[in-house]
Image (cartoon, rainbow, N blue to C red):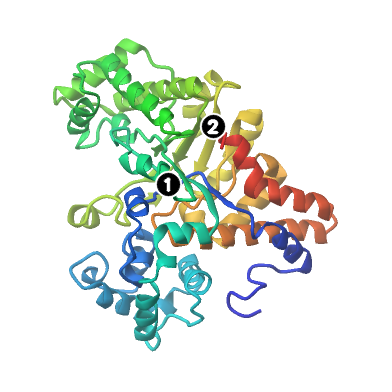
Amino acid sequence: MAFLDDNYLLTNNTAKTIYDQIKDLPILDAHNHADVKEIRENKNYSDIWYIEAATDHYVWELLRKRGVEEKYITGSASNKEKWMKLANVFEQLVGNPVYEWVHLDLKRRLGIDLLINEYNAEKIWDITKELLEQENFKPQALLKEMDVELMCSTDDPIDSLEDHKALKESDCKTKVLPTWRPDKSMHINKVGFPDYIKKLEERVQKQILNIDDLIEALQETHDFFEKMGAKASDHGVEVPFGYIIDHQKADQIFQKRMKGENVKKEEEKAYISYMLHKFGEMNVKSNWVMQIHLGAMRDIRDTLYNNIGPDSGGDISNHFIPIVEPLKAFLNKFDERLKIVLYALDPTHYPTLATLTRAFGETVSLGAAWWFNDSPIGMKRQLEYIGTVDLLMNFAGMVSDSRKLMSYGSRTEMFRRVLSDVLGNLVEKGQIPLELAIRGAVHICYERKKVLFNF
């Protein structure tokens, strides 16, 4: 098997047969971090570094591991200098999905069948520089070429969604929907929390003096997102605190923080729990899906956070976090009322989450292998496990979770090939009929998301 050939990740003929049935299905991407302004403006990309590494903390982390200076990652060096440094160490990234993703982009999107290394770096830079000046490599053309039928960006409640509105009224073939992510209003101990509340006041043109005012303001933004076509909310939490908390207690904690007083850990848990329940009720009213990303410990490396800022590659997983006890009251309160998707950062959480989603029936689903698990190994292990404990037919399906548009096709292809191989192996071992394997693959890749997210 040659590198990224037609048999890539497919280990038997049955897997190839299944993949042939799903490889050309349109892409429905229910969660990503797209730059919607970039799509709306639809300008030509400048160069290969910009489209592959300028916004990708996956790449940044690996370059740091190989000793590349920060100047050539997020620093002052030119994009060409950064690309040349990346190419010099790229061969050392083998075994990591980044090596495959970037080469898939080159091969599938740009038609370049060269390996990235110090000898080919200049040639790849020149070829891609010329290609990216063409009309068919603008953002909207790329989305059309990848057959991205619909995608959901991740947006703050204070966002006016002007770019979404402009896209909706444009000739863009891909439907781009917003997703409501109110994390900044929930993480009460973050340094910028009071400042964020002030921004929310400006957004809704109302003063926020207490917890009721806050919920009313957030509801107003929720209603606006609904009018703009949103189908889901998204929530990033280290621990999914969902305890039932008294309104008066939540109000006291909120006002305490706004006065500049210290909020204790137990109070923080209570406030997050209260807000999560309020968000759930908003979603029930709008018939949205509630996506909960759990387990990420943010900005663990002080030098990165202090010198570069958040989302710069200093986040880790923590397999010690509690899941069932914090979530139990929340899941029971919304049982059969709200569609919930749970994403786990640490693979050791799959056994708990798979049994949890199984216990709560159709309305609670397990989300795609997320972040550090978003690799052939991570996806394969997840699919095999949930197929035997929960149900593959209730799996929420693949999402790109990507900050770079070029990778939507590559990440989707990787998932579809892994899924085909998992199902193909089950057929080869006599565990399922081929017809049902194909039907299941189509359902997971396309039909399931249509129904789950009301697309």
Q: Residues within 10 Å of mark 1 (few under 14, many from 20)?
A: some
Q: Vertically, is 52 above or below 29?
A: below
Give amino acid for label 2.
Ile
Tally of numbered tags: 2
Looking at the image, residue 303 lies above or below residue 90: above
Q: Amino acid at mark 1?
A: Asn
Query: Please, what secondary structure does the residue beneath circle 2 have?
Result: strand
**Residue 431 seen in the current view:** no
Q: Residue at x 76, y 49 (%)?
A: 439
Q: Secondary structure at mark 1?
A: loop
308 or 245, which is in the foreground?
308
Image quadrant where one finds the N terminus = bottom right
- Mark 2: few/some/many CA within 10 Å (<14, 14-19, 20+): many
Residue 102 rendering spot, x and y as whole percentages: 45, 69
- Marked residue nearer the N-terminal end (1 or 2): 1
* Residue 80 percent location from the top left of the image: 27, 76
The quarter of the displayed image where residue 136 is located: bottom left
In the image: residue 153, left or right of residue 213:
right
- Residue name at image x 72 percent, y 58 percent: 21
Q: Nearer the viewer, mark 1 or mark 2?
A: 2
**Mark on residue 318?**
1
Q: In x, y percent, where is residue 246?
A: 37, 12
Measure the C-alpha gap from mark 1 to mark 2. Answer: 22 Å
Whether tag 1 and tag 2 are in contact, CB under 8 A, the answer is no
In this rendering, the answer to whether 419 lies above or below 44 is above
- In the picture of the structure, the residue carrying the numbered disc 2 is 340
Q: Residue at x 70, y 50 (%)?
A: 442
